[in-house]
Amino acid sequence: MELRPILSTLLRHKTAAALIVLEIALSCAIICNALFLIGNRVERLNLVSGVAEKEVVRVQLTGIGEDDNADALTSSDLALLRGLPGVKAATVTNQVPFVNSSWNTGVTMVKDQKQPTLSATIYMGDEQFLAALGPKVVAGRNFASDEFIEWSALDAPGSKISVPAVIITQSLADKLFPGQSAIGKSFYSWGENAIRVVGVVDHLVRPSEQGGAVAHEYSMIFPIHVPFSLGGNYLLRTDPARRDEVLKAAVAVLEKNSPNRIILEKNTKSMEDLRAQYYRQDRAMVWMLVAVILALLVVTALGIVGLASFWVQQRTKQIGVRRALGATRGQILRYFQTENFLLATIGIVLGMLFAYAINQLLMGKYELPRLPLFYLPAGAALLWLLGQVAVYGPARKAASVPPAVATRSA
Amino acid sequence: MLDMRQVTKVYRTAMVETHALRALDLHVKEGEFVAVTGPSGSGKTTFLNIAGLLEDFTGGEFTLDGENVKGLSDDARSRLRNQKIGFIFQGFNLIPDLNLFDNVDVPLRYRGMSAKDRKLRIEDSLGLVGLGSRMKHFPAELSGGQQQRVAIARALAGSPRLLLADEPTGNLDSQMARGVLELLEDINAQGTTIIMVTHDPELAARAQRNVHIVDGMATDLSVEPALIRVAQASGASAGTSA
Amino acid sequence: MLGNSMFAYYFNLALRSFRRNKVLTALMVLAIALGIGASMTTLTVFYVLSGDPVPTRSDQLYYVQMAPESMNGFTPGEEPAEQVTRFDAEKLLREKRGDRQAYMTGGGAAVTPDKQGLMPFQVDARYATADIFPMFDMPFLFGAGWSATEDERRGRVAVIAKALNDKLFGGANSVGKTVRMDKVDFTIVGVLDEWRPTPRFYDMNSDRFGELEQVFLPFSTSRDLKMGRNGSMDCWDDSNDSSDPEGSTGVNAPCVWIQYWVQLDSAAKAAAYKQYLTNYSDQQRSAGRFERPTNIRLRNVMDWLDYNKVVPGDVRLQVWLAFGFLLVCLLNTVGLLLAKFLRRSSEVGVRRALGASRRQIFTQCLVEAGTIGLAGGAVGLVLAWLGLWAVRQQPASYAELAHLDPLMLFTTVALALAASLVAGLIPAWQAMQVTPAMQLKSQ
């Protein structure tokens, strides 16, 4: 198939050709970036949290007014909860993943360091914290029973108590002590004294994914017994099939244990639901992006069909002449298909450049990484295919122009 | 009515210069019926384009109904064309979407007439060509001869000073052709100047005057009837003076 | 050039042409409608989120920022802390250098209703000082805010929102009645009318587009009763050295957790106040309380919202995406219009021969393009309405605010018309170049 005559014909219909090229270029650019954004979101949606989401439920409650007996009440709560049928472990903690509030603090390697090395989140947990939430210990050990301190003692004015031990995530360990075992090492965070690392867990994500892609797993666990009034989170571990049952039973037991509290029903649900709710916005965005990609493809296809049909109609006489001179139907068909392929190629090349330009813009304003190269052939293939599908109808119509048209002048 | 002196028309492209008209002289008086003949490529279509203000010309003088039309803007030419000239094409060129009433209406719209005036004129025009009862019909429903008559009605509706006809019977069979020609003669009898381009010698004979255009120049054949037959027979470049 | 009757004529011709080419016309209208629908949906959401929450006061209300922290973690050139300490808030209020001033923070309270059959429930609360009500121009249904005396006395008074009033008292005038919160009886002094500042500009640390707090009570009272707080607290240096029973919420605690707003009626006063803050900051440094160099910000409402990038990144992204889509739809329309007009070149040639000037042909084409635009705009409006309905179903807190107001409605139609006219320019230009010639052959 000779490209030169096709090119010269196109050059004589510059406006229409330019329109098709531009439309394909712009569609390509937007689609590449949209696919990339979808990839990003899906990555976020598939984030490993370290939590056994299908097995954990969370109850959130708050006290009515101040409770001087919060510690004792918390203990009795936990005893009752741990006694419920189906409950494998229960814990009380200050914060949970997949919510918008978190406790964060600076971490320094040296005492009185002026700039913190980094900021990490603090989970305060008791003996059953790891068992209830799910992260696996991959180095060192869980806390020993003599390492736990009371929050009320720690928080009391003038208190000299310091945190004796800490469990950190692998991610934090790799950052603070690269290439070495973190066990036995220490750093400064709360209090005057260094805190020793006794264990490392594989994953534990920060609440609200703070810290972005790099720091979203900078988490520490302190061995602190907290009263329910600090955050109001009870976490229970059970079988996936028994979650509803356990949740209902837990709520009933807690209400009975003290009339002075309110269960926050909106926030009392399984960890799986909590995660789904947290990511609802991202899921909606993914759907929106998919809708835009589909709509773009449809609109571009319609545009190609429209212009191609018009061209065929304009060149009916020319086609008739070619047929009279011996061209077969197949050759006419292939002519138009090649013409479309050529235009699509130019459009896609331009589109790639646009795609990178758009990506630059987005990178600056929305903290996105650079568009990886493999999205480009994906977008290209999509648009080549689209072009060929769209042009098929008009090309077939062109191929069916009878040679007699050549002599029918007027 | 139409006064052309030494009119030239040159088409220039990057590589070629074509002299379509060279020193064309033509004078048509008001009320005349002139037939313009000539072989293909002689420039008679170009002449018609220029006479109809459809194109501008390169050199010479052209006065239409007393107005010098040299160097007029596109807007001015359009206005003049709209008011003074009526066109009849070989291919009728009626607008297929519009019914007969609306087709005759088109030039009147560009005149800015009131709806009442337009309606009167259209009814009169269509009546004149014998199609007054079919105003709401569409061109596709009419025969070739009838379509051409509508085209004539359209050309007349604006009371033009000059009718320009390009092979008006070219697409018609002999019976329809006769009908159209008779119509043209009637119109001319009522005082409208007509310039008609034609191949048909019989048609040309019906006109008062014959002008032969060859190689971009005009020869008036009305004075030398013998030359008519010579010119038509050879189709080659005939002699000269008039 | 375009008299009334010519416009009607062109419009008529356009309609005829549409009727003859129903499919092509429908496609063009649909393409524009999709583009307009998407753009207006996202634009409306953006418009709702980036609006002025207190248009009557936004240029007079200023947010105070200073840098009270220790040198730990100091980076030169950074922005000062986003909230103030309790010490600074109370001192600035005492010195009263603005036309009005108030400090506040978020909290929560457990309400134990009197009504039979209603279980205790949790509400969001705001702990503030008396001036907050006149400063923010808050509308009252019954009663009014409390006075500065109540602030000093730690009075057990509260202002409740309409929704809470409806729930507890059936919407009746409850001024003077009591509401039991956190086991303490509060006297209601005022009931607020419907108010939903969008966004909740006064506190950027909680749900920015969420609903109003249901309860307002004096800050001092909240400290007296040790009520729970909501929001963000940033502490430097461990506060364990102090023997303050209030811990990090104490007056001298090295923590920022309070929002300070001041009303200044003119630009001159704002400049003067900024100077006052600078002096204050210097004084605190010489007194040894502040360690960092003086770093003052005094932003008015819109600047403060800008600084906080209050419109979520996703919303902005969606606007860009939608307008990119609109651009593609427009290119589509240009192509289809080009095809449409050039298909009719023989008709154009005839019209030109019959006396139409180039400009008249151009105008005729533009009228056709504009008509398609208007039709596309009408359908696009329906699509935008549907789109906004879909947005309202979303889980975001701003979702329920997504509505088409008259300005957006007008913008939809105007945008559709403008877009279609621009799209029609090149095709109309090409159409008007068709030469009027004798050798037109009809097909």
Image (cartoon, coloured by chain):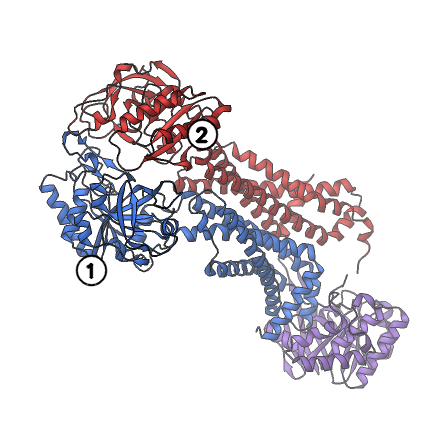
Chain colours: A red, B purple, C blue
Judged from the image, the secondary structure of the residue bearing numbered disc 2 is: helix
Whether residue A295 is situated above or below residue A77 in the rendered picture:
below
Around disc 1, counting alpha carbons within 10 Å, would you say few (fewer than 14), some (14 to 19), or many (20 or more)?
few
Q: Residue at x 60, y 37 (%)?
A: A382
Distance between the alpha carbons at the discs numbered 2 and 1: 61 Å
**Which mark is on residue A248?**
2
Residue that label 1 marks: C268
**Which mark is on residue B117?**
none
Marks 2/1 same chain: no
Disc 2 marks a residue whose amino acid type is Lys
Residue closest to the eye, C41 or A160: A160
Residue B135 occupies quadrant: bottom right
Whether residue C389 is situated above or below residue A194 in the rendered picture:
below
For this orientation, the residue located farthest to the left is: C287
Residue closest to the eye, B38 or B225: B38
Residue A6 occupies quadrant: top right
Instruction: Report the chain holding disc 2.
Output: A
Disc 1 marks a residue whose amino acid type is Ala
Q: Residue at x 74, y 51 (%)?
A: A318
